[in-house]
Amino acid sequence: MDTVLVLDFGSQLAHLIARRVRDLGVYSEILPFNTSKSKIQSINPIGVILSGGPSSVYEEGAPQPLEEFWDYIKEHQTPLLGLCYGHHLIGQHYQGKIVAHDEKEFGKATITLKQQTSIFDSLNSEEIVWMSHGDQVEELPEGFEIFASTDTCPIAAMGNIAKKIFSFQFHAEVNHTVHGETMFRNFLFQICKANPEWKIENWIDDAIKDIQNTVGENHVILGLSGGVDSSVVAALLKKAIGDKVHLIFVNNGVLRKNEVEQVCDWFQNKFKFANFHLADAEEEFLTNLKGVEDPEKKRKIIGHTFIDVFERKAIELEQKFDNIKFLAQGTIYPDRVESQAGSGGKTSSKIKSHHNLALPDDMKLKILEPLKDLYKDEVRELGKQLGLPRELIERHPFPGPGLAVRCIGDITKEKLEILREADSIVIEEIRNAGLYNHVWQAFAVFLPVKSVGVMGDFRTYEYLCGLRIVESIDAMTANFAKIDWEVLEHISTRIINEVKGFNRVVYDISNKPPSTIEFE
Ligand code: XMP
């Protein structure tokens, strides 16, 4: 299949670039900036895109492609597109001059096209683009032409048509570049001559054959969370290997209202998985969490307890079915790329430890990750094609440590019950208002602060319910949702009237960053 490679120089936007390409029907992969020639050769890309990045190309230690990368591009005449930092790299490599500009430029800018060229086909003579840079290409490399300028940036886009190399100072991948998609379309179909073959329908048959060949007559176990990714893996495995898949669903005591019943109903009764195993470990989790207030400790305890419970159940199954040889996981593409070492040479500090299932080595199960190349919305599309209900596919993300990170401070069964009731009201009302699919997440938080209220003729002294509703595209950044006051009021009234334990509701109006989506 035609593949476009994105080399990542530490940009927050590398995924957005790959998404743009995939959305236009062309498969795209992200690899670190220093990927070897042999690896690139094995992918045989029809085009390469160099991402932006926070460094300056002339700085010591700035991420640079290997010399053999440039050799590869020359030998194969592979089309190349550089964006921002990628633009500077191309300028530098082909002997142009890159300089730091006195004023950094952030935000919207208007480019004026200097001549007709295929990369800017079907665009207006002036286009709105998004700039975010300090450096600029000041002198054009030999053999290159200027394709667009702004008032402050004479070489806003340049290229060498014969070599099929193009580069932009601006970020064509972000929505603020109004016709960015057209620019990508031109690069893919006019310059790279790509065939738009990337479709989930085409992917399913190959993935099924792949699973069948890998698994053979063996059995597979899968930890089911009730979320989208593991549910889609379950459906895919069922289609590929039928009843040779064993689902383990752990009740960790910090799930939402009716979640255990609902997941059991879906997978046992509706989808008819013959080997569905519920590991009811509520007491074990709550005992281990007793008196623990520190968010990181809570996360670690839940992660470890989960592995203990899961491992015990898996061993029990292994003893019953001696051909269980695989452990399937719902890892998706961004999970894998985020853990890829070396991207951009910068490491970010650990904010929260998200727990992933890492079983002890002595279990000797081989890992199966059938969704490892898909983005979330591709996983959703796959789920639809496999016949999973919309209600499941469109579920909001729910953190592995569940309500434990929404119940601030130490956790008790009573507090969790109060939170569950309030949370289910939030979801119900957000659905009733038609907002569920328009927001990223909506949930209640248990705040262990008591305040005074009045109910009828009586004074109350109860806990505070936090309400968090956010909009986001990828959870990296998020804004609090500015939803209708009436909806907020209705949620608040219902919680205070119906949930014993809360007598006040507060709406969280913080964005991420600097806040995070979850409270802990
Ligand atoms: P934060 O709170 O870091 O959350 O802004 C970003 C997104 O990740 C979800 N989240 C988790 N997901 N395991 C998960 O699978 C976790 O431990 C975890 N913690 C946070 C969160 O709900 C939001 O969508």
Image (tube, rainbow, N blue to C red):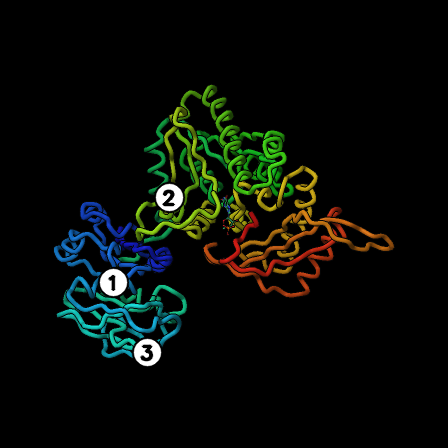
Please tell me which residue is depicted at 39% across the width and 30% down the height of the picture.
326
Amino acid type at mark 2:
Lys
Secondary structure of residue under mark 1: strand
> Where is mark 2, residue-wise?
372
- The residues tagged by marks 2 and 3 sit, at their Cα atoms, a distance apart of 39 Å
| Closer mark to the observer between disc 1 and disc 3 | 1
Q: Position of residue 98 (x, y in %)?
A: 22, 68
Rounded to the nearest angstrom, the CA distance separating label 2 from label 1 is: 26 Å
Residue at the image position 25 percent from the left and 54 percent from the top: 61
- Cα separation, mark 1 vs mark 3, equals 20 Å
Q: Are marks 1 and 3 in contact (CB under 8 Å)?
A: no
Quarter residue 196 falls in: bottom left
Q: Which residue is mark 3?
A: 124
Dot label at residue 81: 1
Determine crowd level at label 2: few under 14, some 14-19, many 20+ residues with C-alpha closer than 10 A: some
- For the residues bearing labels 2 and 1, Cβ distance under 8 angstroms: no
Q: Amino acid at mark 3?
A: Asn
Percent of width and height locating residue 43: 23, 48
Q: Amino acid at mark 1?
A: Leu
**Local crowd size for mark 1, using a 10 Å CA cut-off: few (<14), some (14–19), many (≥20):** many
Q: Secondary structure at mark 2?
A: loop
**Residue 2: % across, % down:** 26, 53
